[in-house]
Amino acid sequence: MTAPVPPRRRSEIEIRWRQFRRAPRPIVRAVASSLLVAIALAVAYVAYDVALARGADLPGGDLRTLAVAAYVLIVLASGSIVTWLVVPQPTGSGRRVVRTPWSAALGLFAAVPISYLVIVVAVQIVRPLLG
């Protein structure tokens, strides 16, 4: 009888690529909800910034700092709330839906890096392209 062949060791890149391709649905939903809100608000911020740069006389004057602060708070809050609504915790029986603060925490933790990355891309890459 021959000895069993041990499985091939995967490289770190192969492991991470597999994890990326097979991400759990709750994680995908949490990231997608935060990403959609962040992109929509970043588009609004870039439009506001372009309007100010072109000399538009908007009520309230230059409120870009307040706009970025509101952007971050809205993305974090909506990421938590939407994830709490969309991502129930697994229960074992498919009949009962359980939502706890952990679902909201998942959304919050997903929204933090997303809000930062989207606003950086909007301000540092997209905004200069618009002139």
Image: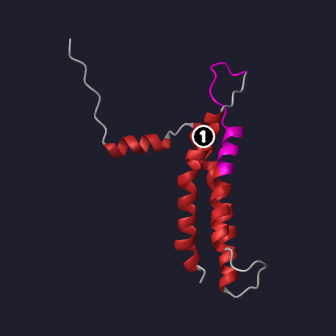
Task: Determine if the magenta segment contains residue 85.
Answer: yes
Look at the image and give the residue range highlighted in magenta: 77-95
**Residue 73: x %, y % from top left:** 65, 56
Q: Position of residue 71 (x, y in %)?
A: 65, 62
Residue 110 lies left or right of residue 51; in this view the side is left
Quarter of image, res 12:
top left
Q: Does the magenta-highlighted stretch encompass residue 89? A: yes
Residue drawn where x is 50% and y is 39% of the image: 22
Q: Position of residue 15 (x, y in %)?
A: 37, 40
- The count of marks equals 1
In the rendered structure, the answer to whether residue 1 lies left or right of residue 112 reads left
94, 102: nearer the viewer: 102
- Considering every residue shown, the one lying at the far right of the view is 59
Residue at the limit of the structure toward the left, as seen here: 2
Which quadrant holds residue 53? bottom right
Residue 57 screen position, x and y as percent? 76, 85
- At 67% from the left edge and 68% from the top edge, which residue is drawn? 67
Amino acid on which disc 1 is placed: Ala
Q: Identify the colour scheme used.
A: secondary structure
Q: State the residue at coordinates (58%, 57%).
A: 115
Instruction: List the residue tagged with mark 1.
Output: 105
Name the secondary structure under disc 1.
helix
